[in-house]
Image (cartoon, grey):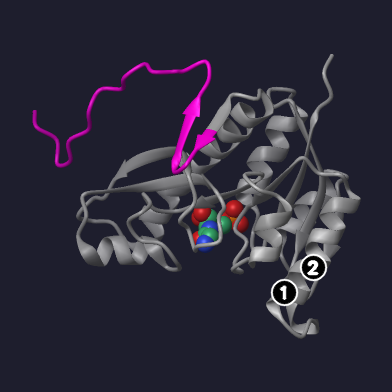
Amino acid sequence: MSRKLRIGALASGGGTNLQAIIDRCQDGSLPAEIVLVISNNQDAGALERANRAGISTLCIDHRRHASREEFDRAVVGALQEAKVDLVILAGFMRIISEIFVEAFPNRIMNIHPALLPAFPGLHVQRKALEYGVRFSGCTVHFVDIGTDTGPIIIQAVVPVLDADTEATLSARILEQEHKIYPRAIQLFAEGRLRVEGRRVSIDPPDDRCPPSLVNPAIH
Ligand code: GAR
């Protein structure tokens, strides 16, 4: 049997995406193992979830480092020491520097709660509501040196309803995040992702065409 993919995860918050991935590793449906969880926030729920799953954790406080680069060097050092094959950002609320991206080229993934390239940055569920889009969703992408600009691996679309609040829309998107992030990692673990410029192709392809979505629905 081939070796399991070794994952290092970075998280700042509650860690529900991390939990979805831990669950898929534990039930054997994802041929991967999270070997280290790093947070910049010692109160992150993600650290507690990792501890409960018996995963090594590390808190690296960005406020104790003089610059973004110095913080990133500490994070990269820990990830390299843990011999990770893939780094996943799972609700990691810090912009990472060139030093970090260059240490793991096309080996860092991020989940973003909008349909990129629409609404990069923060508070994007609120921005989607304010803009009045009829659909939003989530995106898993490889990380490059821009903010939320890297090659897109997988996206899920959800409708935005008239009655939505930031909380209800966020919850609808989060449910999809928990599905597409493990799937993207699975494709990586299976060696099926090819990156050419901005485009990521899946080899062998999975080109079953979903029916189109219309919102509000036409009955
Ligand atoms: C998720 O919605 C994720 O997409 C978002 O933070 C939330 C973390 O939730 N990430 C970003 O906005 C990155 N800029 P979680 O801690 O429960 O996984």
Query: Residue at coordinates 40% horizontally, 60% vertically from top-left?
Result: 167
Judged by its main secondary structure, the magenta piece is: loop
Q: Position of residue 102 (x, y in %)?
A: 68, 56
Q: CA distance from mark 2 to mark 1?
A: 6 Å
Q: Which residue is pictured at 74% across the width and 83% down the height?
A: 63
The residue nearer to you, when weighing 174 against 65, is 65
Mark 2 lies on residue? 73
Q: Amino acid at mark 1?
A: Glu
- The kind of residue on which mark 2 rests is Arg
Residue located at (76% from left, 51% from top): 49
Q: Is residue 155 above or below residue 212?
A: below
Where 217 falls versus 87 (above or below)?
Answer: above
Mark 2, other Cα within 10 Å: few <14 / some 14–19 / many ≥20: some
Count of labels shown? 2
**Ligand 1 contact, mark 2 (Cβ < 8 Å):** no
Q: Quadrant of residue 6?
A: top right
Category of crowding for the residue at label 1, using alpha-carbon neighbours closer than 10 angstroms: few (below 14), some (14–19), many (at least 20): some
Q: Which mark is residue 69?
A: 1
Question: Would you say the residues marked 2 and 1 are in contact, meaning their CB atoms lie under 8 Å apart?
Answer: yes
- Label 1: element kind: helix
95 to 25, vertically: above or below:
below
Q: Secondary structure at mark 2?
A: helix
- The answer to if 200 sits in the magenta stretch is yes
Residue nearer the viewer, 12 or 209 = 209
Q: Position of residue 125 (x, y in %)?
A: 37, 60
Numbered range of the magenta stretch: 195-219
For the C terminus, the quadrant is top left
